[in-house]
Image (cartoon, rainbow, N blue to C red):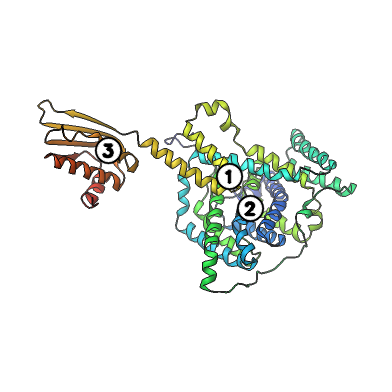
Amino acid sequence: MAVADHPRPFRQPVTVLTALRSPRQLSREVLAGMVTTLALVPEVISFSIVAGVDPMVSLVASIVLALAMSILGGRPGVVTAAAGSVALVIAPLVHEHGVEYVLPTVLLAGVIQVVFGLAGLARLMRFIPRSVMIGFVNALGVLIFMAQAPHVLNVPWLAYALFALTFAIIFILPRFTKAVPSPLVAIVVVTAIVIIAGLSVPNVSDEGPLTGKLPGFTPFLFPVSLETFQLILPTALSVAFVGLMETLLTAKLVDGITDTPSHKGRESWALGVSNIFAGFYGGIGGCAMIGQTVLNVKTGQARTRISTTVAGVFLLALVTGLSSIMGQIPMVALAAVMMVVAVTTVDWHSVKPSTLKRMPLPETLVMGVTVTVVVFTGNLAYGVLVGVVLAMVLFARRVAHVITVDRKLADDGESVRYEVVGPLFFGSSNDLVEHFAYAEDPASVTINLSRAQIWDASTVAALDSIETKYGDHGATVTIEGPDERSTGFHRRLSGHLGS
């Protein structure tokens, strides 16, 4: 872990201008965007089926999201599309009330995200502990791998041969050249073999129909009324916050991969605006696609908005003019690529026995619970929420036992002095009253807080209770030494908190 006083310096980010001036970087950006698109298509189609909407709707929405976030987003390199988390949240509404309620839900979710970003609430990301982030990354790798398993089970034997060939190209080609991403070469070669040889294996078109026709603007088929607002509000809130959480966590992950900073507030409101655009033209919302982002930034070495712009444009070309070719891409080839991404996504160092042996048990527990919740629910947001809450509880429990109270009786026995050391908040101050000998102490009591801090009303209430107890025994209490903030906080609340 980095020491707070010596944070790791961020690298100078690669800009669009510098990439355009460098043929090598530009080709890397373009090719990374193309690989990302090929890996994006089957997932978007699958998620559209989960959500109960037409696959073309999700694909068009993904084009809008990718292009809009490429221009507006605060984290270059993040791939945004119609994601599985949003599909899972919105599916119950669609199945129960109809697809016409998707548009108002996505629009309202977009407005909520815009407000969240403009209000600066993205800064809350700093409260996500490292153990939760590691659990998030490891769970992501597990989910990506598990999502590919159905595409390589119970398939024709030829598919397994193509699966092995894809792996071989991915791992062997980089030994000879890294000018072209090996995953892209693997997909092109395997698809060409299938088309030329006329092989029959499961392909992208089996996931959903690809008509090649754009659906156009989303029609307003829902009733504009208070009842509609009340109906969609819970789902819109879920879409907004699940999308924000996955997007901001993905942005933070890319910050770490690239050693460059990003503007989380801009990323938040840009996601809201992009979802509003996607709602009007496409109809379904989305958020950051974590697996494809890792493929784009880590495997493809993309660093600018060029890669995600290419992804959006290439997806548009595939959907409109190359849908027949796209539909023939074998699913096993895409599955192999994403399995490699999954394996490289996992932080293997974090689960090494030597690391686990040194890591504090609460940190390991938080990481394990985060991974477990994500894997069992299939929702990264749930795992992060549970992980953060557990980390807070364990932290509060740990800090509650770090305060010490030392009693020192004066030589003449006429006064007593208590030295309180440590942070005083609800977890540590609730049993503070038990550290004092009310019946035994003399009439003059001094409580020194020069090495303590008052953080909440619970502490003020505890100090008031101590003074009351001493008053019942005819003693007076003097509180001395707290810092200026603690003094002002105590003075403002003391005596005004009731019994």
* Whether label 1 touches label 2, CB < 8 Å: no
Examine the rendered structure and indicate whether residue 324 appears above or below residue 484.
Answer: below
Query: Which circle's residue, 2 or 3, is located before the other in the chain?
Result: 2
Q: Tell me the residue that label 3 is attached to.
A: 432
Image point 71% across, 62% down: which residue?
Answer: 54
Question: SS of the residue at dot 1?
Answer: helix
Q: Tell me the residue that label 1 is attached to.
A: 374
One can see residue 411 in this view: yes
* Badge 1 amino acid: Val
Q: CA distance from mark 2 to mark 3?
A: 48 Å
Residue 449 horizontal/vertical position (percent): 24, 37
Q: Return the residue found at the far bottom.
A: 224
Query: Which circle's residue, 1 or 3, is located before the other in the chain?
Result: 1
Q: CA distance from mark 1 to mark 3?
A: 38 Å
Examine the rendered structure and indicate whether residue 406 appears above or below residue 223.
Answer: above
Residue 13 horizontal/vertical position (percent): 56, 45
* Badge 3 amino acid: Leu
Q: Return the residue found at the far right.
A: 197
Residue neighbourhood size for the residue with mark 1, other residues' Cα within 10 Å, grouped as few (<14), some (14–19), many (≥20): many
Q: Is residue 388 left or right of residue 479?
A: right
Dot in front, 1 or 2:
1
Question: SS of the residue at dot 3?
Answer: helix
Q: CA distance from mark 1 to mark 2?
A: 13 Å
Residue 410 horizontal/vertical position (percent): 13, 28
Residue neighbourhood size for the residue with mark 2, other residues' Cα within 10 Å, grouped as few (<14), some (14–19), many (≥20): many
One can see residue 180 in this view: no
Q: Is residue 73 left or right of residue 56?
A: left
Image point 65% across, 66% down: which residue?
Answer: 99
Q: Tell me the residue that label 2 is attached to.
A: 84
Dot in front, 2 or 3:
3
